[in-house]
Amino acid sequence: MNLITSNQNKRVKYVKSLQAKGRLRRSEKKLILEGDRLIRDALNSRGRPDLALYTPESADYELIAALQNRNCELLPVSQGVLSQISDTKRSPGILVVFQIPKPPLPVQVERVLILDAVREPGNMGTILRSAAAAGLDLAILAPGCVDPYSSKVLRAGMGVHFRLPFAEATWQEIRAYCAGLTVYSADAGGEAIYTEVDWGPPWALVVGNEAQGVSSDARRISWSSVSVPMSHEAESLNVASAATVILFEAKRQRMTGACPPGH
């Protein structure tokens, strides 16, 4: 196959549009992964690749063969072409268009994370990654969240999109889905310290916007609020860090069977 050196190539223009336009990604039900590690992880998680653009001089041909075995269309391109499409400062040498994974949502859940207008891509990717590592059943993206399929979220998530079921939903849908759960909201001035909560019974945790915290919609469905104590010198805790701390306390209690004093 001839090397593609023009940005005007039809397939190249299509991938460039996918990279730049969230609305197109959603209508086409496609996302873009860059770099050997993310692509391998997606393949190992049964991701379905459609189209790969790669530079022959830096390609890992075992990975190319794995993509070919999945009936992925392969296009060798120049470094200049790939650099024009890549969302990273230094192109990793391969970029693959995958179908957006849609794992079935669990019917019964015991551990749910709700992201409330989380707009910073790195935070969203990190939060989803922590949720998967902590063994959650589901993540729900409430209105106002950043596009979960943007390149920055995908990089921060490190393949979590193919491992953790998550859905975008309205607050009305979220209320109905969480009807059998105790709902907590993470808040710097929370009513209970996160280690004092009994995370044994089925629960949902809401984490909010980086600047404004949880919304009034989230407060209306929450039974209580929880906080992570900080040193007086610290003004605030990053939402991804706070979510990770709380989720792993819940995991610790589940693994050890320990309950907080008074429970």
Image (spheres, rainbow, N blue to C red):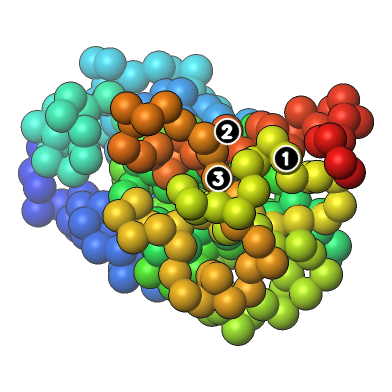
User: Image point 9% across, 53% down: which residue?
Assistant: 8
Dot 1: element: helix
Residue type highlighted by circle 3:
Ser
Q: Which residue is mark 2?
A: 245
Tags 2 and 3 in contact by the CB under 8 Å rule?
no
Q: CA distance from mark 1 to mark 3?
A: 10 Å
Percent of width and height locating residue 137: 74, 50
- Give whichever of 18, 261 is nearer the camera: 261
Q: Which residue is mark 3?
A: 227
Q: Badge 3: few (under 14), some or many (20 or more) residues near its Cα, within 10 Å?
A: some
Res 193 seen here: yes
Percent of width and height locating residue 230: 46, 31
Residue type highlighted by circle 1:
Glu
Q: Which residue is mark 1?
A: 196
Percent of width and height locating residue 174: 63, 74
Residue type highlighted by circle 2:
Val
- Give whichever of 124, 212 is nearer the camera: 212
Taking 245 as reference, is 198 left or right? right
Percent of width and height locating residue 103: 68, 56
Q: CA distance from mark 2 to mark 3?
A: 10 Å
